[in-house]
Image (spheres, rainbow, N blue to C red):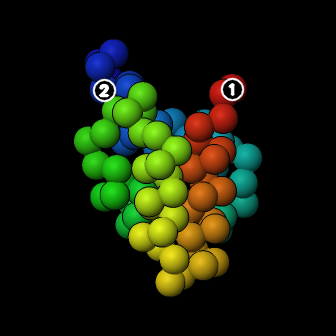
Amino acid sequence: MSEESLNTIDALCELYLTKHAELKKKASSAKMDRWLIEKHLKPYFAGRKIAEITSRDICEFQYFHRNTRTQANRLLEVLSKMFQPG
């Protein structure tokens, strides 16, 4: 993976899945995280650089998913964990 591609949301998603979800969560939870990422996060933030994503973008993402509250909350949990250092 090139240095440039490590700065994308897609790379961050994969890093989260391989270094956190698949190692530290139950298999079913990791599978759900992967589904949420592939179905919702990656399409919504497609091609975006991590540094370009603002809190406003996250709020708009949350608003976009307002009709599925439980899923929206789960998506925000995943995003929050992805953006935590370490």
Q: Amino acid at mark 2?
A: Ser
In the displayed structure, 22 sits above or below 66; it is above
Position of 52 compared to 71: left or right? left
Q: Secondary structure at mark 1?
A: loop
Q: Is residue 5 visible from the viewing direction of this image?
A: yes
Position of 77 compared to 39: left or right? right
Q: Percent x, y for residue 79?
A: 57, 50
Crowdedness of circle 2 by 10 Å Cα count: few (<14), some, many (20+)? few
Q: Quadrant of residue 73?
A: bottom right
Q: Percent x, y for residue 27?
A: 65, 61
Q: Residue at x 73, y 47 (%)?
A: 24
The residue that disc 2 covers is: 5
For this rendering, which residue is in front, 25 or 64?
A: 64
The CA span between labels 2 and 1 is 19 Å
Mark found first going from the N terminus, 2 or 1: 2
The answer to the question of whether label 2 and label 1 lie on touching residues, with beta carbons closer than 8 A, is no
* Label drawn at residue 21: none
In the displayed structure, 16 sits above or below 36; it is above
Crowdedness of circle 1 by 10 Å Cα count: few (<14), some, many (20+)? few
Q: Residue at x 29, y 19 (%)?
A: 4
Q: Amino acid at mark 1?
A: Gly
Q: Residue furthest top?
A: 3
Q: Residue at x 65, y 56 (%)?
A: 77
* Label drawn at residue 86: 1
Q: Quadrant of residue 11?
A: top left
